[in-house]
């Protein structure tokens, strides 16, 4: 059993990890008990708790009001560390803004294919139209060819996201680990998707604990079943003071 003290830094993905995956990205719901659980864990860890997500910081904040946590949004393009906020300016990405407008036209007649405009990135979702997967992927890769090397495609569960090449969960976790209160701690990162694998790689390189929620090939050291399972374990940790999983859960 891993002891819970201020030797650890906890990083948590949002969709599919803290909350259940839903058909539409705007329909996500946070369990009413979760914000208080995370607040208690934040206190136990001396503030070293952060949410690492592809969502914008403003979106995440709105789902945890009145609680506030350190976080990285848009795969690290935005972040708040120890209360210091750095945001991404969509106006600095004019080519991407033009591409987003074009993508909305391209998918307009594809029922169930959704464009999620995140300001400095854009996601193409096909969860409601699985038969359109090939179309969505081809559209995303064609967009990248037009945008050039400054952007890349990030694949996920029924989604392809176009984002600046500099973005990545592994990179932003590395940044957190160089700043207080995260510096010098053993990192724990919990995620559920391909978008989290480079975060797992960073955490593993630091001798940390990587945890994958659900099925799928992974480099994570630990696997859990569902977001509900994780929420229960986080609640136990917050109440009892010991992390309720370790490498033996693999």
Image (cartoon, rainbow, N blue to C red):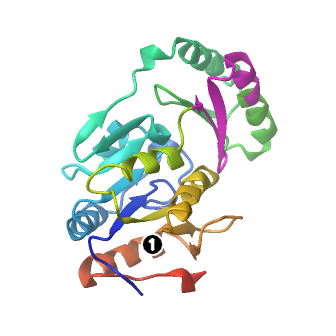
Q: Is 106 in front, or is 50?
A: 50
Q: Is residue 191 visible?
A: no
61 relative to 47, above or below:
above
Label 1: which secondary element: helix
The stretch drawn in magenta includes residue 159: yes
Q: Is residue 130 left or right of residue 59?
A: right
Which residue is pictured at 44% across the width and 34% down the height? 77
Residue at horizontal 34%, vertical 61%? 184
**Where is residue 199 shown, x and y percent of the image?**
54, 54
Q: Quadrant of the N terminus?
A: bottom left
Q: Is residue 139 above or below residue 79?
A: above
Image x and y of residue 101, in percent: 58, 15
Residue 164 in view, yes or no? yes
Residue interval drawn in magenta: 141-165
Q: Where residue 181 sits in the image (x, y, percent)?
A: 26, 56
Q: Can you say whether 60 is above or below 228 in the image?
A: above
Location of mark 1 (residue) = 230
Is residue 128 one of those drawn in magenta? no
Determine the residue positioned at 44% across, 59% down: 19
């Amino acid at each position: 059993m891993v002891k819970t003290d201020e030797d650890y830094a906890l990083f948590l993905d949002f969709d599919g990890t803290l909350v259940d995956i839903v058909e539409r990205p705007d329909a996500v719901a946070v369990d009413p008990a979760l914000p208080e659980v995370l607040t208690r864990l934040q206190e136990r860890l001396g503030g070293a708790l952060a949410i690492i997500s592809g969502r914008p910081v403003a979106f995440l904040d709105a789902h945890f009001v009145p609680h506030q946590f350190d976080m990285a949004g848009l795969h690290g393009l935005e972040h708040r560390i120890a209360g210091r906020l750095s945001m991404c300016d969509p106006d600095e990405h004019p080519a991407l803004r033009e591409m987003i407008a074009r993508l909305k036209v391209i998918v307009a007649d594809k029922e169930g294919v959704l464009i999620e405009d995140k300001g400095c990135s854009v996601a193409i979702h096909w969860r409601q139209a699985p038969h359109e997967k090939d179309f969505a992927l081809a559209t995303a890769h064609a967009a990248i060819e037009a945008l050039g090397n400054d952007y890349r495609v990030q694949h996920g569960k029924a989604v392809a996201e176009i984002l600046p090449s500099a973005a990545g969960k592994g990179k932003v976790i590395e940044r957190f680990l160089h700043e207080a209160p995260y510096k010098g701690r053993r990192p724990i990162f919990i995620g559920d998707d391909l978008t989290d694998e480079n975060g797992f790689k960073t955490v593993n390189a630091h001798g940390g604990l990587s945890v994958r929620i659900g099925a799928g090939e992974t480099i994570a050291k630990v696997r859990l079943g569902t977001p509900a399972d994780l929420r229960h374990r986080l609640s136990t940790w917050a109440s009892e003071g010991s992390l309720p999983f370790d490498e033996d859960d693999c």
